[in-house]
Image (cartoon, helix red, strand yellow):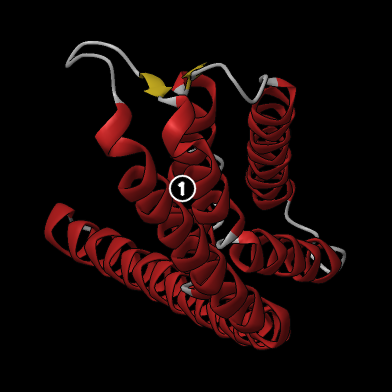
């Protein structure tokens, strides 16, 4: 067999073998693409079902939190309105209510008791709905809201105790800083919950959300 014929045969064999390898690679790659697509569709369907289940309790929870946020800020607005005339200085949160104004001040403070009741009722609803939450990050953020509301009620009760403990013939002097801080913390804790809810309803579950 001369060299030309031998080279032709060898070249043909290599060509056929190369084509077979290319065909195998293409088939393998196509199969992998198909399996990846199937897995992606499966995961997408699973995520859609999970979002559907979540929405049944996260949407009512969002509504309850919005109402709670409004009530907290309404309460803050009223307290600022009632106490503003009695601040003792620009850089302090202490108030001094003259004894002549105390009865009117007490009347004003008690006029917003319905808002305190509303906040408590909404906080209870949030707590009850939270029982359905399985996401640990959301549970943590909801716990922060509950703790902030508890601190708010404690600060309010402390102010009431101090007010009632003040003698009738004395001016009422009180540092509102703990109360105002508790309101601020309660108000700021709610947007953090909304952010996590939005992530869950959009299918984003990363721990850094």
Q: Residue 137 location, x and y as percent?
A: 66, 45
Count neighbours of disc 1 (C-alpha within 10 A) and say few if under 14, some if 14 to 19, many if 20 or more: many
Most foreground residue, 97 or 127:
97
Going 51% across and 65% down the picture, which residue do you hit? 71
Most foreground residue, 126 or 109:
109
Residue at disc 1, secondary structure? helix
Going 65% across and 37% down the picture, which residue do you hit? 156
- The residue to which callout 1 is attached is 187
Q: Residue 155 location, x and y as percent?
A: 65, 30
Numbered label tally: 1
| Quarter of the figure with residue 129 | bottom right
Position of 35 relative to 75 (above/below): below
Can residue 126 be seen here? yes
Q: Residue furthest left?
A: 4
Q: Residue 32 location, x and y as percent?
A: 52, 71
Position of 62 relative to 127 (above/below): below
Which quadrant holds the N terminus?
bottom left
Q: Is residue 115 left or right of residue 33?
A: right
Going 27% across and 70% down the picture, which residue do you hit? 12
Going 44% across and 67% down the picture, which residue do you hit? 70
Position of 164 relative to 117 (above/below): above
Can residue 209 be seen here? no
| Quarter of the figure with residue 10 | bottom left
Most foreground residue, 133 or 178:
178
Most foreground residue, 180 or 113:
113
Q: Is residue 132 left or right of residue 193?
A: right
């Amino acid at each position: 067999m001369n060299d030309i014929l031998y080279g032709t045969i060898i070249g043909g064999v290599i060509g056929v073998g190369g084509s077979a390898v290319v065909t195998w690679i293409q088939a393998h790659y196509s199969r992998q693409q198909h399996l990846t697509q199937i897995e992606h569709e499966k995961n997408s369907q699973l995520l859609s079902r999970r979002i559907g289940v979540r929405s049944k309790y996260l949407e009512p929870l969002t509504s309850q939190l919005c109402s709670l946020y409004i009530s907290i800020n309404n309460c803050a607005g009223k307290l600022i309105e009632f106490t503003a005339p009695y601040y003792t200085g620009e850089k302090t949160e202490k108030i001094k209510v003259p004894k002549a104004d105390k009865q009117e001040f007490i009347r004003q403070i008690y006029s917003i008791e319905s808002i305190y009741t509303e906040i408590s009722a909404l906080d209870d609803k949030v707590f009850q709905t939270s029982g359905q939450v399985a996401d640990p990050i959301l549970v943590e953020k909801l716990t922060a809201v509950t703790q902030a509301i508890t601190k708010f009620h404690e600060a309010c009760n402390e102010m009431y105790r101090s007010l009632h403990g003040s003698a009738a013939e004395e001016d009422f002097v009180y540092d509102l800083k703990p109360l105002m801080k508790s309101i601020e913390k309660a108000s700021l804790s709610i947007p953090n919950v909304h952010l996590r809810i939005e992530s869950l309803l959009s299918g984003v579950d990363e721990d850094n959300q």
